Image (spheres, rainbow, N blue to C red):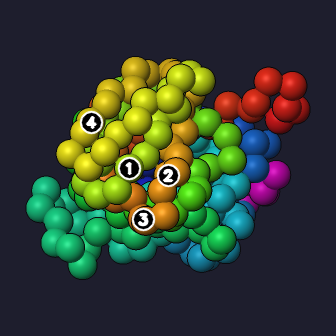
Amino acid sequence: MLGDQIRSIRKRQEITLKELAEKTGLSIGYISQIERNLTDPSLSTLRKISGALGVPTYLFLGDEPHGSLTLRKEEMIQLSQPNSNVRYQIMSPMPTGEFEPQSLVARFELAPRSVDGELPVIHPSEEIVLLERGAVDVIIDGKPVHLEAGDTTLIRSNLPHILSNPTDEVAMGYSILTPAVWFPSTHRNPKPGHKA
């Protein structure tokens, strides 16, 4: 259940209820009710909790992880934000209390003439980008790497990077992150002179 998942992640990170309440601005009692599955939190509450725990909100959305190491197409989590240029499909099993995959595989579709975010992202994992269709520029630490269908590149850990689709067709490919970015914070790197 959702509350068990939140409690498990919080305890794994050795964060107290009081610390989580301070980080989220939510009351200790309310968080305790969520963890005991006595109330269903809103999406904005889940975003506050996931931000404070440094995990992606999608870990708390959708069906409960069922523990299978085999995913069928209809079981894969689809991620996209309103007005976003990119859609993701998580192709790795989700972590459970018994098992936490060491790699995260996500299929992406990037709209024509767009980027996958406003700012470059940084995370503590190595990332392999494999392009299946179209063309993209992977800008790694300010340096562009052009990929055509069938090409791959490896992004070293902790380097700011962003994907750009300079073409008039949708670009499709895969991102493979090792270790998986389930629990570390993933953040966007402000542009020089930009105040976060």
The reply to whether dot 2 and dot 3 touch (C-beta < 8 Å) is yes
Residue type at tag 1: Ala
Q: What residue did someone put label 3 on? A: 170
The reply to whether dot 1 and dot 4 touch (C-beta < 8 Å) is no
Across and down, in percent, residue 69 comes to: 13, 56
Across and down, in percent, residue 18 comes to: 72, 42
Q: What residue did someone put label 4 on? A: 152
Q: Earlier in the sequence, mark 1 or mark 4?
A: 1
- Separation of residues labelled 1 and 4 (CA atoms): 11 Å
Q: Is residue 182 above or below residue 44?
A: above
Q: Which mark is residue 165?
A: 2
Q: Secondary structure at mark 2?
A: strand
Across and down, in percent, residue 12 comes to: 44, 36
Pointer 1: residues within 10 angstroms few (<14), some, or many (20+)? many
Pointer 3: residues within 10 angstroms few (<14), some, or many (20+)? many
Residue type at tag 3: Val
Q: Secondary structure at mark 1?
A: strand
Q: Earlier in the sequence, mark 1 or mark 3?
A: 1
Which residue range is magenta in the image?
A: 25-29
- Separation of residues labelled 2 and 1 (CA atoms): 6 Å
**Front: mark 2 or 4:** 2
Q: Which mark is residue 135?
A: 1
Q: Main secondary structure of the magenta part?
A: loop
The reply to whether dot 2 and dot 1 touch (C-beta < 8 Å) is yes
